[in-house]
């Protein structure tokens, strides 16, 4: 992009952001001024909100201004967390817990999920088309809670903004019994900026607020504002806080931009009957794109060598004899079948751009020609990376080149046909759409800021609301009635051609009571606090989507003055059910389902102190659930069909495919109205946990926790699929946790350290045919060791360090369907006369997508769950200099790891360093940040571990400037 075009784009971004910020201020400031005109409230009579269930109220006081922290990040050892169910100091919580407070969020610049790993061990998170809306804890997708209420899974559909939070609590392992059905690895509990509160939790006495602007590399442009203060409604005194954010930025990947708006408002009122009201709303619109680097090989990772080439056959050329839609700029399903015909009947394993290959044998009966027995694994199957090389080219390519000799000007490819037919798919013939054009193939140095696997628009509307009634005047008896609603509506339009319309909605109510048993009931050496909770949660979801994701057709280095260098053009743009759902020119939906499940349960916990230094925490819970799934009739490119062969009139199978390729066939009636209901199905589960800890001399506190938790087996989009609704074992699974650790606190809280050793697993699955394999609670077992140190040697200096090592394995060998490259399949390079590579082996299949099923007996060698580093370490150093200046340095080291389950591509070890310089003077706060200042090239895997062809390229050096003004 020229400097003039960049300047025009930056100007547009600035104007758009200015308009959005002005609109936000128009809402916030008058509201805040109206609230500020009320008199300052007297000291609170009911305390402040508990940080977790069972917390005692804070001492009531009134502040005139927000407190500005002039020191480095303070120690967190004494801060209350709720990771064990009861609010306790971090030292006394018998679980591995990390707390990120507002100071840490601000100083480290932690604004998004991918930033959390800079401060918290075990939170390395893979990407979904470059987006990290969700978070992994201990290598497994984790739940996210909002003030203790379970949120919808973000799925990578929108950018999770963390700047609206006052703190985050990251708890490792299954949630305590009071939370209900959850996930295995852990959870994150987010606490938003609350209504009119200062940092110590008390209400503000007058109007306080801030405005902030952020700009930097990759056209970063963001504005935020917030205002809070006292409020008096019908004589009920309390506080409010409203926060707004607008962003209009670019990213490291040039095609991917970020546009988001977020508005959050919280209100607290005292003395509403016997309760304090805590309520709020948050609404967000996030518009962005997704993108992976495609055509990944070890050469691309190691030295940036990219396999070039554009698809050979133009699929955007009309549908057979009927030329309607020809040249409309998108490839429809009929065009795929017409211009890349398959051999035999159409099936899920035999489509124009989707072919299944058989896994070859290297020894025994059926050994492939040229196979080397020394590379034979169990069952005689060839080991990945050692498939026999098959010379020559497929017959379909040879015939095309004979008919179009200009595409093989040297004749080298046609000459290779005499040597063999290459690798043949199970269908017997590789369709023409798979091949790259020989006149465009070769190798070149990649531009890492481009992407070939591109999701054009991910538009998400997110809305949540909460309303709590809190009684905590008496710390020995508290009550909390919580109501929560969370909603996610997304629209994803992709060129690949996957597209979807999705709506997920959740409602939850929970009633919690804590009661400390009177001393007269107990011996003098025992203190008992109890907690009981009942809850109801309902989750509903709808999704209508297309299939596809032909991620490798686009050459990221292709020059194109019309469509843009490296960007998609008509032959790599596909129609989907969002932009053209017609049979004639587009692509009808290939999946449509609706799901709803209810959860209701009750739990209890006991917090027992024995002789003051010993603590026993135990609890149990029962949950019941009903689940239902509705599958609607959809197109599978063969005939109208329903999932699981739901009863419909016979429809002609492959004959119908031929008919709609050649004719203007419209939707048949049964496709428009057919449906199949699964459920409602009932299931229930039990959860229990026991923790024991003891305070030893010299500030040392060892602990041990065991837990058995029930797990809801929904997918990553919170939909319970029909295979799970009808599964013999039900739609509730189980997980187990064993964790032992030691925590220590020395020098009056200036040094805190913790070490934890853990083992956790999904415990309710035992064989490869388990029907719940589609659930987001993966059937894995994890062993690990992690440590964390937090030190404040002086008031001006903070040093933090963490390290984690863990190993994950699948509980059993799942029947994984892998995507490999042409070279891995066994295709051979076609060489020019001078010995140079004329047609790379990968070029035989980059136009489509290949599938192989990993044989079960061979899969026993590949049970390791890969995709993230086994060893991770990080360090944070903050120092406050004189005259308001400060400096921050942090770094993370991640070990090398494999991209795919068969361990054929390895991502290298990485070390990144970030720096920050701050200046604070009265109400002015400036920060200059540098990210990846050493400009190290590093990568992250995508979700799953079955695709070797895609990777996220992480940003190079970026500079960011932030200015904030308090008022």
Image (cartoon, rainbow, N blue to C red):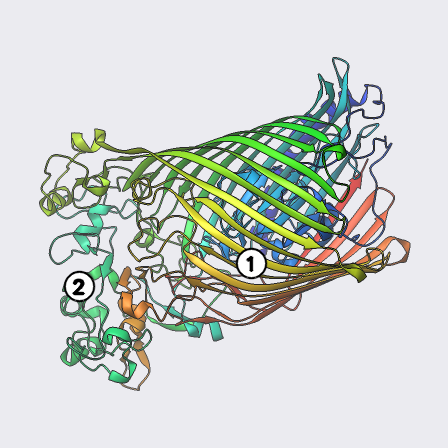
> Image point 57% across, 40% down: which residue?
145
Q: Secondary structure at mark 2?
A: loop
Task: Classify 109 as above or below 634.
Answer: below
Residue linked to disc 1: 124
Question: Is 126 displayed left or right of 929 in the figure?
Answer: left
The correct choice, above or below, for 507 with respect to 717 in the image is: above
Mark 1 crowdedness (10 Å alpha carbons): few <14, some 14-19, many ≥20: many
Q: Nearer the viewer, residue 110 or 696?
A: 696
Residue at far right of view:
883
Say which label, 2 or 1, has the lower sequence index. 1
The reply to whether residue 312 is visible in this rendering is: no
Instruction: Say above or below: 699 vs 597.
Output: below
Check whether the beta carbons of the residues at disc 2 and disc 1 lie within 8 A of each other: no
Where residue 873 sits in the image (x, y, percent)?
A: 63, 66
Q: Residue at x 35, y 53 (%)?
A: 569
| Residue at the spot of label 2 | 426
Q: Quadrant of residue 396?
A: bottom left
Q: CA distance from mark 2 to mark 1?
A: 38 Å
Residue 720 shows up from this direction: yes
């Amino acid at each position: 992009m020229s400097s003039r075009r960049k300047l025009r784009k930056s100007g547009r971004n600035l104007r758009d952001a200015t308009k959005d910020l002005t609109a936000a201020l128009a809402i916030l400031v008058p509201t805040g001024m109206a609230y500020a005109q009320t008199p300052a409230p007297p000291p609170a009579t009911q305390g402040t909100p508990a940080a977790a269930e069972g917390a005692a109220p804070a001492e009531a006081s009134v502040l005139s201004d927000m407190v500005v922290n002039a020191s480095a990040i303070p120690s967190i050892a004494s801060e209350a967390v709720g990771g064990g169910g009861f609010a306790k100091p971090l030292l006394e919580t018998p679980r591995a817990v990390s707390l990120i407070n507002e100071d840490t969020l601000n100083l480290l610049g932690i604004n998004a999920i991918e930033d959390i790993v800079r401060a918290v061990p075990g939170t390395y998170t893979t990407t979904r088309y470059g987006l990290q809306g969700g978070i992994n804890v201990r290598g497994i997708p984790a739940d996210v809670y909002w003030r203790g209420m379970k949120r919808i899974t973000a799925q990578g559909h929108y950018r999770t903004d963390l700047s609206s939070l006052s703190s985050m609590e990251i708890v490792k392992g299954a949630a305590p019994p009071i939370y209900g059905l959850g996930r295995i690895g852990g959870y994150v509990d987010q606490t938003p900026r609350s209504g009119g509160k200062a940092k110590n939790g008390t209400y503000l006495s007058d109007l306080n607020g801030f405005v902030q602007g952020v700009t930097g590399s990759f056209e970063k442009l963001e504005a935020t504002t917030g205002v809070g203060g006292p409020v008096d409604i019908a004589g009920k005194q309390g506080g409010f806080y409203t926060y707004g954010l607008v962003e209009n930025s670019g990213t490291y990947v040039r095609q991917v931009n970020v546009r988001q708006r977020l508005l959050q408002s919280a209100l607290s009122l005292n003395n509403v009957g016997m309760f304090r009201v805590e309520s709020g709303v948050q609404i967000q619109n996030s518009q962005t794109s997704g993108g992976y680097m495609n055509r990944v090989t070890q050469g691309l990772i190691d030295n940036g060598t990219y396999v070039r080439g554009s698809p050979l056959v133009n699929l955007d050329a009309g549908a057979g004899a009927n030329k309607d839609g020809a040249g409309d700029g998108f490839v429809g399903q009929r065009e795929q079948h017409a211009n890349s015909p398959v051999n035999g009947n159409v099936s899920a394993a035999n489509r124009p751009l989707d072919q299944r290959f058989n896994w070859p044998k290297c020894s025994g009966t059926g050994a492939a020609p040229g196979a080397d027995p020394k590379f034979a694994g169990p069952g005689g199957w060839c080991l990945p990376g050692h498939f026999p090389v098959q010379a020559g080219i497929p017959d379909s390519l040879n015939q095309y080149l004979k008919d179009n000799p200009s595409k093989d000007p040297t004749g080298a490819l046609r000459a290779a046909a005499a040597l063999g037919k290459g690798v043949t798919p199970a269908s017997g013939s590789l369709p023409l759409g798979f091949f790259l054009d020989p006149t465009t193939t070769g190798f070149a140095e990649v531009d890492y800021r481009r992407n070939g696997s591109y999701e054009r628009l991910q538009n998400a509307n997110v809305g949540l609301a909460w309303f709590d009634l809190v009684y905590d005047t008496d710390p020995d008896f508290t009550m909390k009635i919580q109501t929560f609603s969370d909603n996610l509506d997304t629209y994803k339009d992709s060129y690949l051609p996957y597209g979807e319309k999705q709506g997920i909605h959740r409602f939850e109510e929970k009633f919690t009571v804590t009661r400390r048993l009177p001393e007269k009931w107990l011996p003098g050496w025992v203190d008992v606090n109890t907690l009981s909770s009942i809850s109801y949660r309902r989750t509903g979801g709808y999704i209508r989507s297309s299939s596809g994701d032909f991620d490798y057709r686009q050459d990221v280095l292709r020059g194109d003055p019309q469509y843009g260098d490296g960007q998609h053009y008509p032959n790599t743009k596909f129609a989907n059910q969002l932009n053209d759902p017609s049979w004639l020119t587009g692509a009808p939906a290939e999946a449509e389902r609706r799901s709803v499940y209810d959860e209701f349960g009750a739990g209890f916990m006991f917090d027992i102190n024995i002789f003051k230094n010993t603590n026993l925490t135990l609890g149990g819970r029962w949950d019941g659930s009903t689940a239902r799934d509705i599958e609607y009739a959809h197109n599978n490119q063969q005939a109208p069909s329903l999932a699981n062969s739901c009863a419909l009139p016979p429809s002609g199978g492959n004959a119908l495919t031929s008919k709609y390729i050649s004719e203007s066939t419209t939707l048949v009636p049964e496709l428009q109205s057919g449906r199949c209901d699964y459920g409602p199905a009932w299931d229930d589960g039990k959860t229990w946990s026991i923790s024991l800890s003891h305070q030893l001399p010299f500030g040392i506190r060892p602990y041990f926790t065991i837990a058995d938790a029930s797990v809801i087996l929904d997918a990553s989009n919170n939909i319970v699929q029909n295979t799970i609704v009808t599964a013999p074992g039900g739609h509730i699974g189980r997980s187990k946790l064993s964790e032992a650790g030691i925590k220590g606190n020395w020098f009056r809280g200036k040094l805190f350290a913790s070490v934890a050793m853990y083992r956790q697993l999904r415990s309710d699955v035992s064989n490869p045919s388990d029907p719940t394999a589609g659930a987001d609670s993966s059937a894995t077992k994890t062993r690990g060791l992690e440590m964390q140190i937090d030190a404040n040697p002086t008031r001006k200096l903070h040093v933090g360090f963490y390290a984690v090592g863990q190993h994950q394995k699948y509980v059993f060998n799942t029947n994984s369907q892998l995507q490999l490259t042409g070279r891995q399949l066994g295709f051979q390079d076609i060489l020019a006369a001078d010995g140079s590579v004329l047609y790379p082996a990968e070029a035989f299949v980059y136009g489509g997508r290949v599938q192989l099923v990993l044989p079960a007996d061979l899969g026993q060698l590949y049970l390791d769950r890969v995709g993230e580093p086994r060893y991770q370490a990080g360090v944070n150093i903050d120092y406050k200099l004189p005259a308001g200046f400060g400096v921050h340095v942090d770094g993370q080291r991640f070990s090398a790891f494999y991209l795919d389950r068969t361990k054929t591509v390895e991502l290298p070890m990485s070390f990144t360093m970030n720096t920050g310089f701050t200046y604070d003077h009265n109400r002015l706060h400036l920060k200059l940040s540098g990210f990846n200042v050493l400009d190290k090239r590093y990568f992250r895997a995508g979700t799953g571990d079955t695709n070797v062809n895609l990777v996220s390229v992480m940003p190079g050096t970026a500079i960011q400037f932030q200015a904030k003004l308090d008022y």
